[in-house]
């Protein structure tokens, strides 16, 4: 007996219907997130874009008059004394200082973080959680409190100097507070966990049989590390570096508390424009410059890792 | 169960706090005597909540942005006209308050608030230099301490990052008047600051402890703060630069969008009572501008060099006016250049 279908169904129509319902509900489910992102991330950014194209008010705020001066002032400024247009070398050198500090911190966290991650990942399975947990302990305390605690260690009458003097290793306190050393030390300490965790995740997945195979083929330890281990944990290293580099670029509490605030960081420069500088458009333009650079770094990262995946296949 | 109980009790506490009358004071950090607030609460039943700021500009920017929830604010003299001009202050008429009679006449007709229609003195003081005389025993009544520092102090100097004060001191040191736009003088100021900075260790606030523990040996500082340093470390002394030092006064003002304006006015009247004004000074170690408060002051303040300006240096003190925007822009550029 020939069966007459109740409803004429084109092949695949049901799947199509289901798919539509599925995408509808997915859309509905993500609606709250989209609303929140629009309200609290996109909208303020748009306000900032707008402000960067306005004229600074006399005592902060903005006047509703279009101007591109905020943006040109990021790179070019009138000379203070003879009014010629010159490179804003103050902005550039402050920017370079932030980038340099971020690069150094990233490198230092890698140097200290990689062995740490390796150590944790090579513990027996039951112990790893404990070690990882210990890595996260510093996060329990507020950043500012930890930074001020470092001050207590390195100050002229601080713990380190007092111990060294007591042991007669030095006669006079070493100046550590308010130096580049202090900033590097503090930043490395603060951002180290952000490097350890992703690198740990990568090392944990490492197939150690491959390392053994390399040794079987007479690879030296260094060659095995360079040719086998490093390429395999590279995504973890890149992820860690990004996680450290980006917040470093905008960091300003640690450099200010440990560096003595004598030299501005990019974050301080932006703050100055919204405070004593009373130049909000320039502040907004500087913020966007920072964001643009972070974006470029991220895009570079995504391309770097996606190329990695392609060659993996 | 325990957690539920804890949450409930937190809620109950929050509810209790909300029912009591509250006053929100937005003041400089480490500047408000807790005893003063206790006394006010005891007398009026109003609980005062203090929030700190560390610079005039921070306070101005935050209040301008709105949604702050403060009732009273304590700006410095040069900033009061900006606050008024921007329409942020309520005309609270302290001159019609009961305790107004106690205000020292020298502080009534001031440039920034003639006749005192908006503000009540909180404290006044000077910006000069602090020096640890254990390390340097030369003349300390000069801005050369930080602008042309003696060899002994180099590398141990702090300059508070207060743009107005530091620019004012430097301009007067190089022979100009505050708010000058004279490029010749500013050129000297710029070059002088850039050169001097090489001998500075830091540009930071909150240095009482660092001076006391001798991380810092000299620097630009406020008189009352230096007084507190001396109490912790007797070698620290305050100098009044003879080339010109900055005199300032911070005054309490009622915000236009205050939630509790009546309590705010009560507080303004309260601090014009000599005994209460003395409490303010007892804590932060500055003078207060209220007649008769001296007799309630601690003994050590009556003769302290930080508070009693030496006769021969009195004329070197200057109030900082509000600089015009284009001058301010110039100063910001020099300031940014200094910290690049």
Image: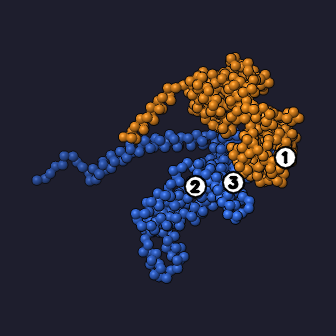
Chain colours: A blue, B orange
Other-residue count near label 1 (Cα within 10 Å), few / some / many at <14 / 14–19 / ≥20:
some
Residue at image coords 75%, 48% = B158
Residue at image coords 54%, 63% = A113
Q: Which chain letter matches label 3?
A: A
Tag 3 residue: A157
Q: Nearer the viewer, residue A96 or B232?
A: B232
User: Could you say where residue A191 lies in the image, as x and y percent from the top left?
Assistant: 56, 56
Query: Disc 3 or 2, which lies upstream in sequence?
Result: 3
Q: Is residue A171 visible?
A: yes
Tag 1 residue: B144
Pair 1/3: label in front = 3
Badge 1 and badge 2 both on one subunit:
no
Q: Nearer the viewer, residue B298 or A184?
A: B298
Tag 2 residue: A190
Element under label 3?
loop
Badge 1 and badge 3 both on one subunit:
no
Pair 3/2: label in front = 3
Other-residue count near label 2 (Cα within 10 Å), few / some / many at <14 / 14–19 / ≥20:
many
């Amino acid at each position: 007996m020939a069966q007459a279908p109740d409803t004429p169904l084109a092949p695949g129509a049901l799947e199509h219907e289901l798919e539509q319902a599925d995408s509808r509900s997915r859309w509905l489910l993500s609606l709250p997130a989209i609303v929140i992102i629009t309200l609290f991330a996109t909208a303020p950014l748009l306000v900032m874009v707008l402000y960067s194209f306005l004229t600074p008010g006399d005592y902060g705020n903005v006047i509703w008059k279009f101007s591109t001066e905020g943006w040109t002032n990021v790179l070019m400024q009138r000379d203070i004394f003879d009014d010629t247009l010159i490179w804003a070398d103050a902005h550039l050198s402050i920017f370079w200082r932030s980038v340099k500090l971020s690069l150094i911190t990233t490198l230092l966290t890698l140097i200290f973080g990689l062995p740490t991650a390796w150590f944790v990942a090579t513990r027996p399975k039951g112990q790893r959680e404990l070690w990882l947990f210990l890595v996260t302990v510093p996060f329990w305390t507020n950043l500012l409190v930890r930074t001020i605690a470092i001050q207590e260690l390195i100050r002229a009458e601080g713990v380190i100097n007092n111990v060294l003097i007591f042991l007669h290793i030095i006669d006079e306190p070493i100046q550590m507070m308010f130096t580049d050393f202090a900033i590097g030390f503090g930043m490395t300490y603060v951002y180290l966990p952000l490097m350890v965790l992703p690198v740990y995740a990568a090392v944990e997945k490492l197939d150690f049989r491959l390392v053994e195979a390399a040794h079987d083929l007479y690879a030296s330890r260094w060659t095995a590390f360079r040719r086998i281990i490093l390429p395999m944990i590279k995504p973890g290293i890149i992820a860690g570096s990004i996680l450290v580099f980006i917040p470093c670029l905008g960091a300003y509490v640690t450099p200010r508390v440990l560096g003595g605030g004598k030299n501005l960081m990019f974050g301080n420069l932006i703050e100055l424009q919204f405070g004593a500088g009373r130049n909000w458009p320039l502040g907004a333009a500087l913020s966007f410059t920072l964001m643009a650079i972070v974006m470029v770094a991220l895009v570079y990262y995504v391309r770097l890792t996606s190329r990695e995946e392609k060659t993996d296949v | 169960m325990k957690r539920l109980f804890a949450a409930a009790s937190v809620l109950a506490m929050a509810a209790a706090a909300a029912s009591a009358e509250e006053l929100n004071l937005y003041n400089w950090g480490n500047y408000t005597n807790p005893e003063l607030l206790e006394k006010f609460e005891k007398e009026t039943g109003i609980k005062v909540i203090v929030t700190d700021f560390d610079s005039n500009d921070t306070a101005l920017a935050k209040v301008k942005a709105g949604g702050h929830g403060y009732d009273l604010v304590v700006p410095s003299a040069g900033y009061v006209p900006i606050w008024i001009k921007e329409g942020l202050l309520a005309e609270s008429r302290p001159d019609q308050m009961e305790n107004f009679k106690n205000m020292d006449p020298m502080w009534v007709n001031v440039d920034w608030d003639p006749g005192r229609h908006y503000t009540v003195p909180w404290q006044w003081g000077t910006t000069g230099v602090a020096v640890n005389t254990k390390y340097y025993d030369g003349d300390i009544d000069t801005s050369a301490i930080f602008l042309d520092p003696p060899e002994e102090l180099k590398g141990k100097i702090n300059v508070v990052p207060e743009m107005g004060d530091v620019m004012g001191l430097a301009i007067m040191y190089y022979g100009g008047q505050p708010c000058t736009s004279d490029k010749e003088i500013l050129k000297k100021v710029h070059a002088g600051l850039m050169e001097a900075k090489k001998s500075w260790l830091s540009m930071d606030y909150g240095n009482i402890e660092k001076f006391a523990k001798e991380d810092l040996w000299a620097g630009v500082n406020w008189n009352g703060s230096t007084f507190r340093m001396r109490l912790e470390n007797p070698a620290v002394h305050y100098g009044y630069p003879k080339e010109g030092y900055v005199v300032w006064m911070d005054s309490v003002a009622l915000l236009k969008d205050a939630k509790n304006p009546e309590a705010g006015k009560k507080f303004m009247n309260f601090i014009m009572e000599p005994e209460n004004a003395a409490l303010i000074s007892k804590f932060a170690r500055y003078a207060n501008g209220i007649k008769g408060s001296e007799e309630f002051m601690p003994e050590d303040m009556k003769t302290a060099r930080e508070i009693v300006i030496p006769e021969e240096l009195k004329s070197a003190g200057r109030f900082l006016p509000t600089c015009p925007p284009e001058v301010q822009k110039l100063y910001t550029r020099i300031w940014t250049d200094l910290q690049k």
